[in-house]
Image (cartoon, grey):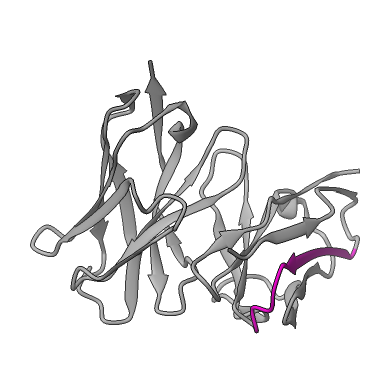
Amino acid sequence: DIQMTQSPSTLSASVGDRVTITCRASQSISSWLAWYQQKPGQAPKLLIYKASTLESGVPSRFSGSGSGTEFTLTISSLQPDDFATYYCQQYNSYSTFGQGTKVEIK
Amino acid sequence: QLQLQESGPGLVTSSGTLSLTCTVSGGSIRSSSHYWGWIRQPPGKGLEWIGGIFFSGSTNYNPSLQSRVTMSVDTSKNQFSLKMTSVTATDTALYYCVRLPLEHYFDSWGQGTRVTVSS
């Protein structure tokens, strides 16, 4: 099965910072990658699919890039509402998630 | 607006069967553009895909759970269901029902239902 590895596991940042989270696949997944945001006590929310397509209603400060085995989620200017845990998910072969990246206040 | 609502027992005995139902409102489960599925999240941990089902009954399951999982759909009630047999404490988790476009990412989620497996 395809393993997904996110880095870092935890990220400390301030409001206004540019934040980048990396997700690596154990084998090529083309562009079949999604990103989710999860806040405490809430279900995950889809942010990006097909590596770089922004889900409707998601702020444009979120962007995704990459293909093959390496992907990034970038938040261009971190807002107070963005402190959360972020997960990547591959859907090239079945479905597996990364272990998550917690974005916390610095 | 599409809503998904999980229901089922919050406590299951070890070695027993976990049974959950997801009721879909604000949309039809007979969509030709979507699968429906289940994801779980153990306390304090990450997300694990369990499986998905099309309204026709076609299924695909996580290979690591396939031997214990059965999913079904009831189009007359706009519901789909999950059964997981031989549960153990490691099956204790928050269980989400989800909608999947044909590409198999997850674009709509229920609020989740907590299931505890006790001995």
Q: Is residue A22 left or right of residue B12?
A: right
Q: Residue furthest left?
A: B76
Q: At x 55% / y 38%, what residue is drawn?
A: A41
Question: As displayed, is residue B115 above or below residue B62?
Answer: above
**Residue A79, visible in the rendered structure:** yes
Q: At x 46% / y 79%, what residue is drawn?
A: B103
Which of the 4 quarters of the picture holds residue B73?
A: bottom left
Which of the 4 quarters of the picture holds residue B15?
A: top left
Q: Residue furthest top?
A: B119
**Residue B111, visible in the rendered structure:** no
Residue A3 coordinates in the image, percent (x, y): 66, 61
Q: Nearer the viewer, residue B42 or A81?
A: B42
Q: At x 33% / y 70%, what residue is drawn?
A: B35
Q: At x 41% / y 48%, what residue is drawn?
A: B96
Q: Is residue B106 magenta?
A: no
Q: Is residue A20 magenta?
A: yes
Question: As displayed, is residue A71 above or below residue A14?
Answer: below
Residue A56 coordinates in the image, percent (x, y): 54, 76
Q: Is residue A53 left or right of residue B25?
A: right
Q: Nearer the viewer, residue A42 or B113?
A: B113
Residue B66 coordinates in the image, percent (x, y): 37, 54
Question: As displayed, is residue B31 above or below residue B20?
Answer: below
Q: Quadrant of the N terminus of chain B?
A: bottom left
Q: What is the number of callouts on the image?
A: 0
Q: Which stretch appears magenta?
A: A18-30
Q: Is residue B73 left or right of residue B84?
A: left
Residue B27 coordinates in the image, percent (x, y): 25, 69
Q: Quadrant of the C terminus of chain B?
A: top left
